[in-house]
Structures are given as structure tokens and as C-alpha cells.
Amino acid sequence: MRSKHDGVIWAFFWGGLLLTAAFVLVPVANAIWLSFHQSSSFVGQPRWVGLGNYARVLGEAAFWRALGNGMIYAGLSITLQVLLGIAFALVLNVDFPGRRLVRGLAVLPYLLPTVVVALTFQWMTDGSFGIVTALLREMGIGPVPWFEQPAPAMLSVVLASVWLWTPFVTICFLAGLQSVPAQLYEAARVDGAGAWSRFWHVTLPQLKPVLTVVVLLRAIWMFNKFDIIWLLTRGGPLGATEHLPVLAYKRAFSLFDVGGGAAVATLSFLILSAMVLVYFRLFPLEEKGR
């Protein structure tokens, strides 16, 4: 029996499908098509080169360096975000005066535009008047070349990313903690379990589904993250923070190698897809047999 709301439902369905096709599927297909062609602009006549762009890109050290940088950046960022997110969620889950206000303030960094976070981080780490520089000077540590040397530059983009996106992870884990039955903690206390034992044997297993999804989402986003790195370092110094999205952008818009940039983007998509499939094999969202 057809409902009077069926037309509205189908309108939203087909509307969403068309928007997805227009803004996601078509650009992806166009990028893959461009990766098989050689062109110096998006309006010029492309020349078919088959797998030539892929062979050329895979044969360059810059690609493998960018892939390694992306792995390091994503791995460090995800690890710190998860550890801090769990810690903050545990604190915000405790009942204390002003908890609602603190919860609201904890979300603020996630609401800020990325460009604001990048500029603020640059001001804080400025070698002359930055607050971080002043604090390090009080501790007897000289100015840190945050954006002039490879290791500090990578650390800077990781810390900025952790600052910006840890609130999202915190919210996810806090929601997971809200669903843990209080009876489990009471039973653990009766059995004589301490705080660490309760966390390890009660809290962490209950957070496993949330942890699985959070790590997957953060891995996808951090591996593809472009704006924070471009705003802070533009992939420098000497390519130390240049990962695959930045490499693809530079090839297409700085070197006018549209086909090469599309090939890098397509390879990045394939690598990430393979990683997601392996992740699902290792950490299925649902246990078998359920």
C-alpha cells in the first residue's frame, strides 16, 4: 500500500543520489580518466598515454617519500587523538560542578575554521613573540625551528591536527561511555578491581566498537587531509611534510602536470581503499556469527 509520503521519500532519495553523483562520482571518474592522459591544463586537449603517468609517478622518489610522510602524519595524529580523546572523555564523563560548560568548551577547537587554527598555531609558535616560544624560553629551551627543519615541521602539523580534531574523537568516546552499563562497574568493584583494572577489563572492551569506527574514520580523513598541511608548511621544508594530496595538488596546479597529478590522486585513492579493506578484515565491525 502506497503512502502519501512516498513521493517525498523518493524525491529525497533521488535528489541525494543525483547530488552524490554530481559532486562525488563524476569528479572521481573524471580524475581517473585524466590520469590516463597527458595535459598541461584542464581546458587543453588531453593526449592518451595509457599507464604512462602511473609508471612515471611510481618511478619517482617523491611519490614514495610523500606516501611515507602521509603514513607518519596519519599514524602519529590518530594515535595522539585516540589517546587524548579517551582521556578527555573519561574526565568529562565524571560528574563535577560545571561539567556541561566544560563539555561545551571542549568542543570549541573542532568548530573553528582550519585557516583560523593554522594562523593561531603559527602565531603561538612564532620565534619572536609566540606564547609557546616564551614558555620554552622560561624552561631554558631555545627557539624551536617549527617550520624550518623536517622533524619539527612534521611535529607542528601533527600537533595542529591533534588540537583541531581531538574534540571529535572525545565526543565519540564520551557517547560510548554513556552507554556502558553502571552494573558492570559495580560488579568490578565488588570483585575488588581497581581503577586501572576497571578501565582495562570493562571500559575498553565496551568502547571497542566505537574505537574501531573512530580509528577508521580518522585514518581516512587524516590520510586525505590537505588544508592544515598546506596552510602551515605547503609540504616543506624540502618535502618533509609533503604527502600524497599535497603532491597531487603541486603536480596539477604548480607544475601543470594534470595527468601526473590525477595519477597521484588515483593511486592515493587505491592505496586508501586497500587499507580500508585490510582494516575491515582485521577489525570487523560485527563479530562473526552474530
Image (tube, helix red, strand yellow):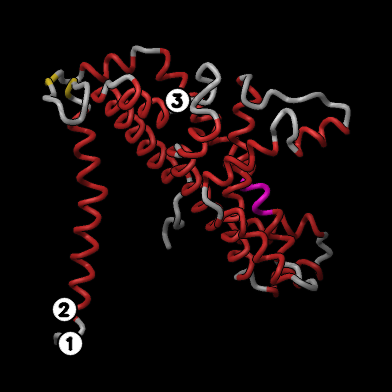
Nearest the eye: 43 or 109: 43
Residue in the image at 58% along x and 45% along y: 117
Task: Please name the residue shown 53% across and 26% down the image.
Answer: 241
Residue at numbered disc 3 = 67
Principal secondary structure, stretch drawn in magenta: helix
Residue 240: give x, y in percent of width and height.
54, 21
Mark 2, Cα crowd under 10 Å, few <14 / some 14-19 / many 20+, is few
Residue indicated by mark 1: 4
Q: What residue type is labelled 1?
A: Lys
Q: What stretch is highlighted in magenta?
A: 81-86
Element at label 2: helix
Q: Residue at x 28, y 26 (%)?
A: 263
- Residue 184 lies, with reference to residue 205, above or below; the image says below
Residue 194 in the image, given as x and y percentages of width and height: 83, 59
Q: Residue 99, image x and y in percent?
A: 73, 70
From the viewer's perspective, tell me whether residue 127 is left or right of residue 41. Answer: right
Q: Mark 2 points at which residue?
A: 7
Residue contact between numbered discs 1 and 2, judged by CB atoms under 8 Å: yes
